[in-house]
Amino acid sequence: MDNSTRKTLAVILSLLEEAQERLSDESMSQVRDAADAEQEKFDNMTPGLQAGERGQKIEAAASALSSAADEIEQASTALDEAIGHLNEATE
């Protein structure tokens, strides 16, 4: 591997490591906590309110936030793997 490629990969590796730091467990936990709070709001509503527009919006938000937390976790895992592969390739 030539020096130019190594330098390019070092920059990419640095960017990926920075992104990984930003996708910390704390970030994922905060999103998951928000999902749990929305789900708890929904669960504490009467069945009539749950079926209403507000209840449906709260339930949809809880579901979307839960999905977002799952995706953040998957992205974090994928970044870990990519960083590992880049480190291996540039050794």
Image (cartoon, rainbow, N blue to C red):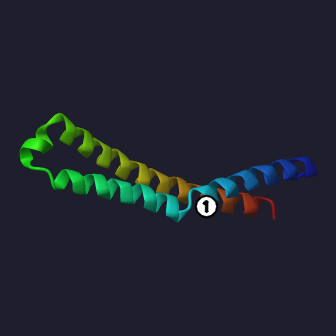
Q: Which residue is mark 1?
A: 80
* Residue in the foreground of this view, choosing between 14 and 50: 50
42 displayed left or right of 78: left
- Give coordinates of residue 75: x percent, y percent: 53, 53
Q: How many marks?
A: 1
Outermost residue on the top side: it is: 53
Q: Secondary structure at mark 1?
A: helix
Task: Give the quadrant of residue 18.
Answer: bottom right
* Residue pictured at 24% horizontal, 45% vertical: 59
- Give coordinates of residue 2: x percent, y percent: 91, 51
* Quarter of the rendering occupied by the C terminus: bottom right
- Give coordinates of residue 1: x percent, y percent: 87, 53
* Residue pictured at 72% horizontal, 57% vertical: 86
Q: Amino acid at mark 1?
A: Asp
Outermost residue on the right side: it is: 3
- Give coordinates of residue 87: x percent, y percent: 74, 62
* Residue in the foreground of this view, choosing between 81 and 38: 38
51 displayed left or right of 10: left
60 displayed left or right of 19: left
Graded by Cα atoms within 10 Å as few (under 14), some (14 to 19) or many (20 or more), the crowding at tag 1 reads: some
* Residue pictured at 74% horizontal, 63% vertical: 88
45 displayed left or right of 3: left
* Residue pictured at 14% horizontal, 37% vertical: 52
